[in-house]
Image (cartoon, rainbow, N blue to C red):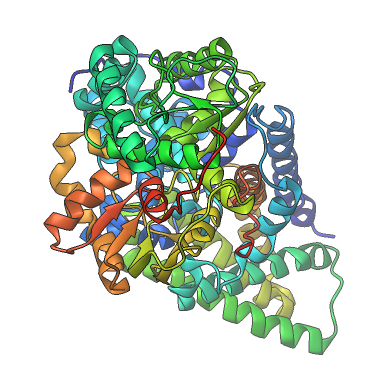
């Protein structure tokens, strides 16, 4: 990790801070009660991983550069200069020991928004060139190729063609299609690049749902990537470039609703953060695919076989979709339509523990060992349910849990929401 | 009134001015602009942030640490009680004997909680690593304020000591973490705003 030591205060403090920043920079009372809310701390008992410690790294820089107390009495209030050594310590903890899952904030005795502070810290480090190279290369891939896995256009189109054939087999309808770049459809559907690269069947699964719902929809070959890893790297300019591409493609294809694929951070980054990167409210509807599927069920547009899934099933709540995105009950509503034995993890919903793959962790191989060690909390949560299938509406979580499954010998099957719904769908004739 | 009564009023006035300055600083920039389309009831969420979300049964930091949480609540109650009594003591208005008795019991309990929290901060390695000198000074000053409030309520000869300790506390207010008296409310507001916009708070039962 290379970086320059700033001689002046970090750029994020140069503009007038808003009340959210001032509040969060000054609110932590160092009670230390947040420790048990963090799975990194719970799994390792490493005191450096306490959320309060991570928040303090960022607030100590604020105190040093933005408060008279930090300038006059730096030792008294622990105000620290942001030099190269300190930046390395921050990089290790803010990138490598926090997924910005927000569990600590929800339980904080004061109400400090720790992930907000961690992301501000990541922005500081990004300005200094301290973003881990592995994470930055994922961002660069998206910037340079249009998707974070640098999938060539021909490869993408070949995969879609292949999945279209799968869809025909599934529906028994030789006319069933996966539309690409079609204008004025109701829905533009995005993908996580992991789907065309590693899990193409999840594309045909969602296509099957759209088919039986009689939906008017399309994919884009120009901009289908739902992810935005610049949200994790802390670079707002790069995050804005990636978000703007999707906004422009929506405008270009003139669709009414953008349905974000099963990707927690992608949903968060576009639905909740992108309007602020781009300083505008989008003139189209933005929903997650989970909400889309739930809506089809409620409206009777798809029918599910209530006896289809007989083995115990649990759900892992992706932090960015649930705790930070408000999609809390829809996934439960869907599963309860056709799962005989639905078992909740404890805790679950907005209190659920992160799987350990969020915050860009999966992209940063240098932290692999720590990531897998911290995942013991999630592994035990899953084990205690006795579930044979773990459903999670997030490809990032799927990747992490696939590794957790092997590492902790859980013996579970992992499925996205679209995959399990497609399995339970009752075929019927459509007007599509 | 002796000269030090007039001097003693200066630090609390300065502390009040600091509070006002902090509030103006928080309010002036306005609510951070957010262009995302809200999914929930923001005002209900803010209400929830100040009320039910603080319920110890819902808050992991409370139910996993009940002794510390209870000590913290009692300690803060003692601080507010001491602050309420400050103007009465300054004006030399003596409360009735039962009021002094009950107040003394509460303040002795709260001061003991403060000492307990201080000992925990000093002896628990994870707390020690999280703490800076300001954390210790703030605790000592607040606990000292509570103790001297009990003393002055029971022994009128202790006014000078009381005003020295309260003066130090109020003078220190703008320096360190005591400012959370203002920031706490702002933090709850912003948390309510964040989770409310996204439809996370207040939690709803499955539809």
At x 47%, y 67%, the residue is B60
Left or right, residue A207 beside residue A17:
left
Quadrant hosting residue A184: top right
Image quarter of the N terminus of chain A: top left
Quadrant hosting residue B161: bottom right
- Asked if residue A186 can be seen in this view, the reply is yes
Residue B6 placement (x, y as % from top left):
80, 51
Image quarter of the C terminus of chain A: top right
- Asked if residue B172 can be seen in this view, the reply is no
Left or right, residue A376 beside residue B47:
left
| Pick the front one: A21 or A379 | A379
Residue A418 placement (x, y as % from top left):
40, 46
| Pick the front one: A378 or A76 | A378
At x 42%, y 40%, the residue is A208
Residue A117 placement (x, y as % from top left):
45, 37
Count of numbered labels shown in the rendering: 0
At x 40%, y 16%, the residue is A238
Left or right, residue B109 beside residue A405:
right
Q: Is residue B126 above or below residue A301?
A: below
Quadrant hosting residue B102: bottom right
Residue B106 placement (x, y as % from top left):
66, 81
């Amino acid at each position: 990790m290379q970086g320059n030591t700033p001689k002046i205060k970090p750029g994020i403090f140069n503009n007038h801070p808003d009340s959210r920043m001032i509040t969060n920079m000054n609110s932590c009372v160092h009670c230390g009660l947040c420790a048990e809310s963090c799975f990194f701390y719970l799994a390792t008992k490493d005191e450096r991983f306490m959320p309060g410690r991570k928040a303090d790294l960022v607030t100590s820089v604020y105190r040093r550069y933005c408060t008279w107390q930090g300038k006059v009495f730096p030792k008294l209030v622990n105000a620290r200069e942001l030099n190269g050594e300190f930046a390395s310590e921050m990089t290790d903890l803010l990138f490598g020991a926090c997924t910005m899952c927000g569990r600590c904030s929800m339980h904080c005795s004061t109400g400090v928004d720790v992930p907000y502070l961690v992301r501000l810290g990541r922005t500081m480090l990004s300005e200094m060139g301290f973003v881990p190279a592995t994470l930055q290369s994922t961002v660069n891939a998206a910037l340079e190729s249009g998707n974070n896995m640098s999938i060539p256009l021909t490869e993408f189109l070949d995969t879609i063609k292949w999945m279209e054939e799968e869809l025909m087999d599934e529906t028994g309808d030789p006319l069933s299609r996966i539309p690409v770049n079609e204008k004025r459809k109701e829905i533009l559907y995005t993908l996580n690049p992991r789907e065309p690269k590693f899990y193409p069947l999840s594309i045909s699964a969602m296509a099957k749902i759209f088919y039986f719902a009689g939906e008017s929809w399309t994919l884009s070959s120009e901009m289908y990537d739902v992810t935005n890893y610049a949200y994790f790297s802390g670079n707002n300019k790069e995050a804005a470039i990636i978000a703007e591409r999707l906004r422009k493609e929506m405008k270009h294809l003139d669709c009414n609703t953008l349905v974000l694929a099963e990707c927690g951070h992608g949903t968060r980054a576009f639905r909740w953060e992108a309007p602020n990167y781009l300083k505008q409210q989008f003139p189209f509807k933005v929903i997650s695919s989970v909400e889309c599927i739930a809506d089809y069920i409620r409206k009777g547009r798809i029918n599910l076989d209530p006896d289809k899934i007989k083995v115990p099933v649990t759900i892992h709540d992706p932090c960015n979709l649930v705790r930070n995105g408000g999609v809390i009950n829809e996934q439960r509503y869907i599963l309860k339509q056709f799962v005989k034995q639905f078992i909740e993890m404890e805790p679950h919903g907005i209190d659920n523990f992160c799987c350990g793959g969020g915050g860009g962790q999966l992209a940063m191989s240098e932290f692999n060992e720590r990531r897998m060690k911290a995942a013991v909390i999630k592994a035990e949560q899953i084990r205690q349910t006795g579930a044979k299938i773990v459903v999670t509406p997030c490809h990032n979580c799927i990747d992490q849990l696939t590794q957790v499954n092997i590492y902790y010998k859980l013996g579970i099957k992992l499925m996205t929401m679209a995959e399990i719904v497609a399995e339970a769908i009752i075929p019927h004739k459509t007007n599509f | 009134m002796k000269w030090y009564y007039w001097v003693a009023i200066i630090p609390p006035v300065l502390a009040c001015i600091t509070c006002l300055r902090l509030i103006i600083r928080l309010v002036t920039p306005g609510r951070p602009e957010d262009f995302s389309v809200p999914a929930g009831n923001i005002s209900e969420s803010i209400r929830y942030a100040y009320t039910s979300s603080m319920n110890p049964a819902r808050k992991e930091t409370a139910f996993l640490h009940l002794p510390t949480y209870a000590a913290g609540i009692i300690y803060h109650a003692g601080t507010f009680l001491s602050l309420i009594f400050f103007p009465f003591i300054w004006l030399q208005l003596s409360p009735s004997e039962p009021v002094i008795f009950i107040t003394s019991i509460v303040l002795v309990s709260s001061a003991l909680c403060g000492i307990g929290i201080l000992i925990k901060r000093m002896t628990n390695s994870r707390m020690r690593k999280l703490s800076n000198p300001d954390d210790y000074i703030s605790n000592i000053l607040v606990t000292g304020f509570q103790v001297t409030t009990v003393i002055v309520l029971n022994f009128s000869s202790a006014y000078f000591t009381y005003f020295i300790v309260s003066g130090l506390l109020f003078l220190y207010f703008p320096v360190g973490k005591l400012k959370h008296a203002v920031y706490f409310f702002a933090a709850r507001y912003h948390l309510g705003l964040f989770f409310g916009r996204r439809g996370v708070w207040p939690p709803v039962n499955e539809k």
